[in-house]
Image (cartoon, rainbow, N blue to C red):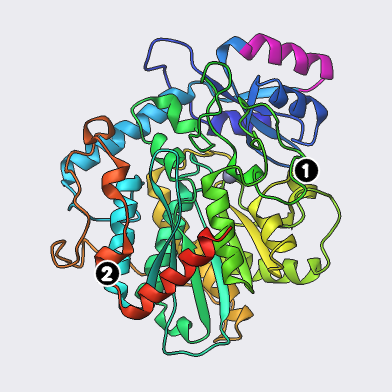
Amino acid sequence: MWTIISFCCLVFVGVQGEPGPELWRLEASTHHRIVRDLEDSGDVDVWGHSQDHAQVLVEPEAKSRVTRALEEAGISHLVEVEDVLGLVEEQRAQRRKRSTRSKRAAQALDWNSYHDMNDIESFINWVNVTGGDFVQVIPAAVTEEGRQVLVVHVSDPTVPEPKKKIWIEGGIHAREWISPAVTTYILYQLVTEWRDMLQVTDWYIVPVANPDGYQYTFSDNNRARMWRKNRRNNHARNGRCKGVDLNRNWNLKWGVGASSDPCSETYKGPVPFSEPETDGLQKVMTSIGDMDLFITFHSFGQTILYPWGWTNNAPANAKQLNHLAKKFADKVKDTSGGKIDYKIGGSGPLYGLASGATDDWAYGRLGVPFSYTIELPDEGRHGFLLPENRISSTVIETAAGVQCMVSYLANFGSCARRKTRTRQPIVTPRQQNYTPGQLSFAPRQENLNPREQNFTPREQNFTPREHNLTPRQLSFISRQNHALFRG
Ligand SMILES: [Zn+2]
């Protein structure tokens, strides 16, 4: 087993001439006390979970301490990636090269490369403008750095209730880049190919729940690529420790399996909903009320998790949760030609106890009967650094799985386990020759180097009123705002 892994995994030569963190695979689950202790002490950053192993990032200065602790506990380890920063730089260099070569159209969003907040905000703008009465953009919160957390509501206003309400969230953990790729792709499908589903469903898509953190991972500093939390100043240790783990900040059994240390990757925040992102989103969700399906996309692990995360006890409708999850898993497996095989289970039992996550809150507080965290591919080969050539297949397969779940839930069409023989090419706004001027895209600078781009979030502020919304959209948004800012 170890031999196979060592052959498969990449080792890059350091690019900065100084030792960087290594990715280790430990022969112990993340449930293991030693892994928890190492994480709490800040000596490792847990990347991957499994019942029989853990993937952890180890900084050079912690190597000897971690090695000693593992030896004392009798746990073996394998260095999977020797130079993680080298791998980050390699991927960044590829992106830079391709961007320069292709001279991408100003507002293009495709699913062959990863896109920063600038591109994603432009895409949301495009969806808003082209979606007409079908689309409303709800600003849920303003972040520490002045970005807006946007919820895109896609609905056919001519179809009366009742309709199944679906909430899709992505990008709550900054470094999990494949997640916003999936949420934007589902959004794109909704406003192009899936309009018939709006006969029976209403969708709320949060493309990026943590825009500050996500944008930070695109900065020039290769270490920033590993950032998980938001970018809030914790005023801890002379401002050196920033950020709250937004997926430990929701108010249900808050604190279990989360850190009180502002420097920790799993810092739960000073109080539940202390962060503008989580507080803003929970207010929108609460104002919507009866939802039927909640999905938050994370990476990595190819696992569909359902509540609870805070306890190992099974939820009341575990059987149904498992059944619907299997619809997703089967469809993804078929669409991928058998290559992508998801595991299914409760968060606590599979990944170890952790509270303050969105799926537990949606299930336990909001009463959403079907609530999931989907850990996207892969299983750990590339971890958070999933190569760009994996994006298109991942988003197509995942969207097929989601469509299947929703079809089943809404009793709309069949979700037959048939093989997808040919994959439809992804048609992007750019390829369809949309004219930015006609669509009121936000201005965007051409230079794709993040440092030179001088990305100023306040200039990108998304004000729905400026984008020719219909009276119905405006009244919807003012209703939402009223609910948002009440109390
Ligand atoms: Zn995550």
Quadrant of residue 79 in the image? top right
Question: At label 1, which amino acid type do we have?
Answer: Leu
Query: x%, y% of residue 280?
Result: 53, 54
- Give the labeled residue for mark 2: 129
- In this figure, what is the number of numbered marks? 2
Q: Is residue 195 left or right of residue 95?
A: right
Residue 47 vertical placement versus 114 (above, below): above
Dot 2 falls on a residue whose secondary structure is helix
Q: Is residue 183 left or right of residue 359?
A: left
- Range of magenta residues: 62-75
Quadrant of residue 137 in the image? bottom left
Closest to the camera, between mark 2 and mark 1, is: 2
Res. 377 visible in picture: no
Query: x%, y% of residue 17?
Result: 39, 10
Question: At label 2, which amino acid type do we have?
Answer: Val
- Give the labeled residue for mark 1: 353
Ligand 1 within 8 A of label 2's CB? no
Upstream in the sequence, badge 2 or badge 1? 2
**Going 64% across and 34% down the picture, which residue do you hit?**
266
Dot 1, crowdedness within 10 Å: few (<14), some or many (≥20)?
Answer: some
